[in-house]
Amino acid sequence: MKLATWWQRRAVRITVYVALAVGTYLAALGWGLPALIERQAPKWVAQEMAAELSLEQVRFHPLEWRVTIDKLALTGDDGKPLAGFEQLVVDLEPWRSLFSRHWQLQAVSLTAPYLDYRQRGPEENNWHQALAPLLAKAESAPPEPEPEPSGLPKLAIDQFVLEQGRIRYEQDQRHTTELTDLALEAENFHLARGENKLALRLSGPGGGQANITLDANFDPLDLAMTLDLKNADLTRYWPYLAEDFHFDLANAQTDINLSAHLSLDPELQLRIEQGELTLRDLDMVYQETSLVRMQQAVLAPVEFDLAAQQVSLGELSVEGLAVKAQLSDKGVDLATLLTPIGAEEAEAGSEAPSEAPSPWQVQLQRLTLADATLSLTDRTAETPVDWQFDVAPLVVGPLGTDTAQPLTIDLDTHINQYALLTLDGEWQLDNNQGDFEVALNDFDLTDTIPYWQSLLNLKLHSGQLTTRGDVTVALDDPLSVTFQGEIGVANLVTQDALAERDFVKWGQMDINHLDFDLAQRFLKIDQLAFNEPYARIIIDEDGSTNFAGLVASVEEDQQAGNEAAQPAPAQTDPEQPQTGEAPFDVTVGRILFANGSAFFADNTLTPKFATGVETLTGEISGLDAQQESRAVVDIQGQVDRYAPVSLKGTVQPLAEKPFMDLALNFDNIELTSLNPYSGTYAGYFIDQGQLDLALKYALDDNQLQGSNQVVISQLKLGQRSDSDKATSLPVALAVALLQDSNGVIDLGLQVSGNVDDPEFAIGPLIFKALGNVITKIVTSPFALLGNLLGGEDPPDHVQFAAGQSQMDPEQTAQMARLVEALSQRPSLVLSAQGAVDPVADGRALAKVALDARLMPQGSGLTEPPELALAAAYDAVMGMGKAQSEQQMLAERLPDLDDEERNRRWRKGLYEQLLDAQPADEAALKNLASARGEAVKAALVEAGLAAERVFLRESRINLDQSGAKVVLELDAAG
């Protein structure tokens, strides 16, 4: 058949035309369109962007309307990638699009897409650089009228699959984060209609995985989302925040599970429901030291409502928390380390908003810490102090913006492993006050040593504090703190740090009820009980005491320096009342002592002295700070196990002006235990003796009145000591004077003084009073004897007439009175020493000798004969002298009659002879001796034992103090 004939056929022509059209269609779309895209797309990118586009291959299946693009890569001018993918496959539905009047895609498959975003400073990034030409052209183009909003494009995709996606983010060429395994699936996706279901899955660095499901409506936007994030490694994202914090994040993983709803109809709304956040294996590090470590924290449920401005959090449960912090004068370092850098300056420089926004309502129902440990190093003390708080558990809640709702706190924590602290109560946030039940068991007081060690020369070896009670705190002005409860301190043992000797200790101290109020300024104690209390009082060789040395001298010097640096206080009127806080009203119902003891040692003595008080029991009741209040004291004990001691009376030590009326009694104290004192100060050791001591002191209006009654039984002094501190008073004589016939010394001492006197001290007052009594006794011993008898004091000497040695009846009676007094002081002996008056006694003895020569014994003469007198005169004065004296008298007194003249002449001769008579020292000695013997004889005759009277030698050392016998008292033996 000819070709023309064949072409004439209609069917042939139609077939050829159709074939040509199909071929042209297939060639244009199957080959031409991909080629056009491959050539023009890179050119357009090069012209319109600062980037380069490369395509490996573009394919279009004209029959299936499938577009395939392989290995697209978009790179910047720097040659670094911006975005790309391995393959994009799009199955078009042209006929459905035509009939449904919207873009319809059967399937979209995107394999291994990637996106790189590199931040280059605060406002610069790689995408901004790549799009800069395009953005510049858009800005320079004339503005076009804004089109009417037409909503989202009508695009429907039957199936959308994205797999093996990757997103990379880089910040300032230092920190990089890459999200991998990005996958997204959607079916029946339609931008213009609702009920779109999408599933997104991605993996983060470190193995974290996120699964997101979306029920989406895009016009208007309405999203319902569920998020399930597992094992997200937060350390991979920490570098972006590290510069804003002082610490580093060494480890942290998180899980997030929540449901959320986002809507723009009619305005932005966001709700999160049933959220659960988990943070695991947290480790926050500073300078290679872990600050905060945590095994796990779970917060659930989490509810968030943007429109209602509400955040509702269920329980934050924290397990395995370990915190390390340091406390310094600047505060807790952890607060600074966890605060963002620059946050304090930003907060301080920020201005308050002109209108306060609507308040958010935030509430956390409960915070629970289980197995938490806080390690705190306190560097405010002179030496750092380490504290460890093991919390198991702490429950706090609710926490939130509703301050009217009380905050409940339940805390159980161990302090330094052993002490247990429990705290249960509520804190009212709106008025800053709280009520708590507090209990502390077995707190080791030795943990507090660094806080006071530099202030006290004291070592604390043991002591456990236990307390239980109710505490209220109100942060008002002034601060209000109250406590009602009990306190106990067990096994307290302290030691003098300088001498390393026991100081104060007890087995148990209990306060059964204590009521304290800081605002009302009162402290009330019902009963304070000490069991087995002990105190050690030491006087060292230099005279200092262990109590006086308790306060460290460094502190005293520092205080003195501070006082010296301060200006002198202004003078005030003493009558003007001082303003300030009222003194604390302190009340103590009873102070009990059981099984107490004390030790006293005085090392200033030679030998050293020590004694103990044991079985100390008793009480002080009714102690009150009110001025007129009086506390009753009743305490008993024993010195050296068998000598009872008691203290009774009333006191008021807490008032501004103290009051005291106390009686302290010691019975049957063995004086041999006081040998160090007697040997040092009295100059004698004691062989035996017992002491009863009754001390009564009254202090009122700062005036002290003391009455000391000392009773010493059967005192016997021993050998003398060689102490250079011994008194010069005759102690043995004083003892003999004071000791009665029963061997008892009963001595009363009265003391008084003003306690406001800066030099006031009770010890010197007592010793001064005792010294005055002894001095008075030994200097006026006969006055003491007179006091024993009542009436006139016995004489301390016997006076004789000149030249005489005989005693008259009155003198004899005085000796009898003296003997009576001496009978009451059997330890006294008496010495008698005869004395003469050289003039009076010498003349008397001379007269006796002259009369014996002029008037011989037995002559019966009462006056010397005239011839004998004249002869004796001439013999002494010279021959004829007597006659010359007679003639001179007649010439001088011519008017006298012969008898009177003769009498005067004879008297003158006699007186001149008497004056010329030589003194006879032997006679004077004999006279002194005779007088002493006469006195002794009178004493013995009156009943005094002869062995208690001693005559002192008068002939060798003649006492010329007068015509008398001197009496002196002394101690026997």
Image (cartoon, rainbow, N blue to C red):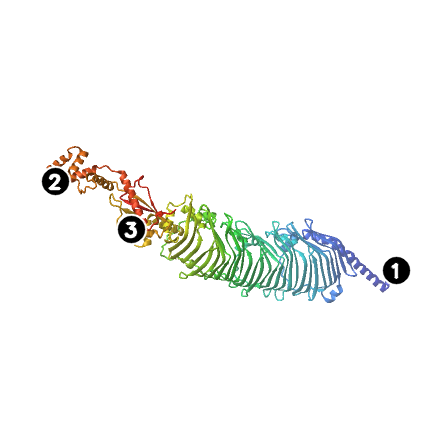
Q: Give the structural element (helix, strand or loop) at label 3.
A: helix
Residue beneath label 2, please?
A: 901
Identified by mark 3, the residue type is Gln
Q: Mark 3 or mark 1: which is in front?
A: 3
Question: In 3D space, how far apart are the residues under numbered discs 1 and 2 (Cα atoms)?
Answer: 232 Å
Question: In 3D space, how far apart are the residues under numbered discs 3 and 2 (Cα atoms)?
Answer: 47 Å
- Label located before the other in sequence (3 or 1): 1
Local crowd size for mark 1, using a 10 Å CA cut-off: few (<14), some (14–19), many (≥20): few
Check the picture and name the quadrant holding the N terminus: bottom right
In the image, 145 versus 241, the foreground residue is 241
Counting from the top left corner in percent of width and height, residue 259 is at 66, 64
Residue beneath label 3, please?
A: 814
Q: Vertically, is 829 above or below 523?
A: above
In the image, 494 versus 189, the foreground residue is 494
Which mark is drawn over residue 3? 1
Q: Vertically, is 440 above or below 729?
A: below
Q: Give the structural element (helix, strand or loop) at label 1.
A: helix
